[in-house]
Amino acid sequence: MSDTTPSQVVSQLIEFFAAKQFDKAADLYSDDAVLVLPLAQPNAPIMVGGAGIRKMANASRTTMYEDIHVQNLTIRTTADPEVVIAEWDYAGVSPATGKPFETGNLIVTRVRDGKIVSSRDYHDHVVRAWISGDLDTLLAQLAEGN
């Protein structure tokens, strides 16, 4: 049993990703956690278990933006004490364009005994592709239907 609240766990997760502390972020998930990215197209990934989530987090090392920070973070509790909804913006400068950006994020997360057991993460993947310089690749994948 953990004394860490679901809101605290999710806040840590968001800050760890912003600080590129991907191993620490992955450690917040349970071994059987399910992470769904419904807006990631063309193939919305579903990661299961700590190993799958760690692999995704470590892949982010090359795709996350430089010098990002969290702003406008709001974490809402729900009638279910395990479930929280977090909404925030990442802001920074695109390494691909040199232009400033701000991109919104929303996650619905279930935390049990201090570990994330499930999460549905909604990010603007088109803006993320633009920020990282991969917009042409994403558009080509979408056109191919892959």
Image (cartoon, grey):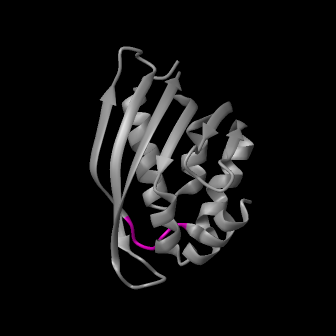
Magenta: main secondary structure: loop
Residue 105 position within the rendered picture, expressed as x and y whole percent measured from the top left: 40, 50
Q: Is residue 65 magenta?
A: yes
Residue at screen point 43% across, 59% down: 18
The foreground one among 18 and 44 is 44
The correct choice, above or below, for 118 with respect to 64 in the image is above
Looking at this view, name the residue that lies furthest to the left.
72
Q: Is residue 34 magenta?
A: no
The correct choice, above or below, for 104 with respect to 132 in the image is above
Residue 72 position within the rendered picture, expressed as x and y whole percent measured from the top left: 25, 50
The correct choice, above or below, for 46 with respect to 62 in the image is above
The foreground one among 28 and 35 is 35
The part of the image, by quadrant, that contains residue 146 is: bottom right
Residue at screen point 51% across, 43% down: 121
Tell me if residue 146 can be seen: yes
Residue at screen point 33% across, 49% down: 88
Residue at screen point 35% across, 81% down: 99
Tell me if residue 31 can be seen: no
Q: Which contiguous range is marked in magenta? A: 64-68
In the image, 68: left or right of 52? Answer: left
In the image, 99: left or right of 116? Answer: left
Residue 27 position within the rendered picture, expressed as x and y whole percent measured from the top left: 60, 42
Residue 115 position within the rendered picture, expressed as x and y whole percent measured from the top left: 55, 30
